[in-house]
Image (spheres, helix red, strand yellow):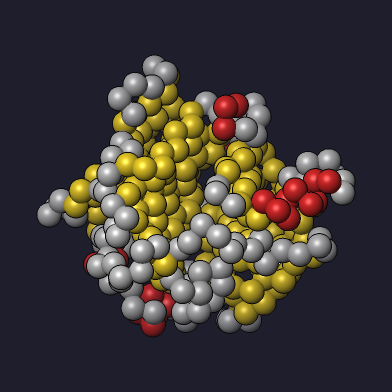
């Protein structure tokens, strides 16, 4: 399948860059996520916003972590709001969020200007240039069976000024978008793993269990100038025996073009991101994928009750 075909089959349009008319479901939710990295400093970061139009609320913010420690208070910058006003949409294709984040659409689905201003410690000015067209998750596929969702890797460049220090950003990273009902209960474990570089994009979804080897149930690969969805594969996860944190990943997937892609990743730094009934540990990774050196991330989502049970038996 071509990149354009993957998007057109699932109905991506330029309107999907903005807020969608909500259904009458109270829990209707829109999310906007852009990641970026400074690998030489073991630094990872998210720009993130979650909008509940029916509730009239925006949550999210900016978090920047390094290898100093995994907790939010260890991070160089952590700001995660819960109950702010809705964002403002401008006619120019600009979204302004009350967190301090803004997104300017330069080219629908492909090019964005990103900013964040906390009015105190941090100023972010970045550009995102897509490496492939947005790739929608097929309708009904986990982990978002009732929501629309797409993923895309891109080249991210620009600057961060944090506590007066200028940090240059030039990396390949992932973004995603989703819209649909999203409650704060009922989550299952999720493994969301990706790698990105100028010639290669790799994304896998898994539903982790008790075994180290997991089945890849969806995702996509871009390599050799062609994008294809993943038909199957395995992900073997190494974990710290004490904390359970992801320390390494061995991956092998086959896509719908019949290509096999193999990769190995090692953890660089991580941030524990608490939710209402879940915990997501974001781990920055260094990858070797088919002899290419790439960077990426693993998002390791646990329901709190399962994480507590695991911790009590280690």
Q: Position of residue 22 (x, y in %)?
A: 29, 67
Q: Residue at x 25, y 67 (%)?
A: 21
Quadrant position of residue 5: bottom left
* Relative vertical location of residue 26 with respect to residue 170 in this rendering, above or below: below
Res. 157 in view: no
Quick check: 275 left or right of 84?
A: right
Along the line of sight, the residue nearer the viewer: 275 or 129: 275
Quadrant position of residue 12: bottom left
Q: How many marks?
A: 0
Quick check: 219 left or right of 19?
A: right
Q: Position of residue 296 (x, y in %)?
A: 58, 50
Residue found at the very far top of the displayed protein: 164
Quadrant position of residue 263: bottom right
Q: Position of residue 266 (x, y in %)?
A: 72, 46
Q: Residue at x 34, y 47 (%)?
A: 58
* Relative vertical location of residue 25 with respect to residue 111 in this rendering, above or below: below
* Relative vertical location of residue 263 with respect to residue 272 in this rendering, above or below: below
């Amino acid at each position: 399948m071509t990149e354009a075909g993957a998007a057109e089959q699932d109905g991506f349009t330029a309107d999907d860059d903005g807020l969608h008319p909500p259904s009458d479901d109270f829990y209707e939710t829109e999310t906007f996520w852009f990641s970026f990295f400074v690998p030489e400093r073991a630094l990872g970061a998210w720009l993130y916003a979650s909008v509940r139009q029916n509730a009239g609320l925006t949550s999210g913010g900016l978090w920047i972590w390094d290898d100093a420690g995994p907790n939010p208070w260890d991070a160089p910058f952590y700001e995660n709001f819960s109950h702010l006003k809705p964002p403002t949409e401008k006619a120019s294709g600009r979204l302004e969020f009350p967190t301090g984040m803004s997104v300017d659409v330069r080219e629908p689905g492909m090019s964005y200007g990103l900013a964040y201003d906390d009015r105190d410690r941090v100023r972010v000015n970045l550009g995102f240039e897509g490496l492939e067209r947005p790739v929608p998750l097929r309708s009904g596929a986990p982990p978002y069976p009732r929501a629309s969702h797409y993923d895309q890797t891109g080249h991210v460049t620009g600057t961060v000024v944090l506590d007066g220090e200028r940090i240059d950003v030039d990396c390949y990273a992932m973004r995603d978008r989703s819209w649909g009902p999203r409650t704060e209960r009922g989550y299952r474990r999720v493994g969301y793993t990706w790698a990105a570089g100028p010639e290669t994009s790799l994304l896998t979804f898994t539903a982790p269990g008790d075994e180290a080897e997991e089945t890849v149930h969806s995702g996509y690969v871009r390599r050799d100038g062609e994008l294809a969805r993943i038909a199957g594969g395995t992900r073997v996860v190494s974990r710290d025996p004490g904390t359970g944190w992801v320390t390494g990943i061995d991956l092998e997937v086959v896509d719908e073009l019949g290509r096999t892609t193999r990769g190995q990743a090692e953890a660089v730094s991580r941030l524990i991101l608490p939710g209402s009934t879940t915990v997501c540990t974001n781990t920055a990774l260094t990858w070797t994928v088919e002899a290419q050196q790439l960077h990426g991330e693993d998002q390791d989502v646990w329901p709190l009750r399962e994480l507590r049970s695991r911790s009590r038996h280690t």
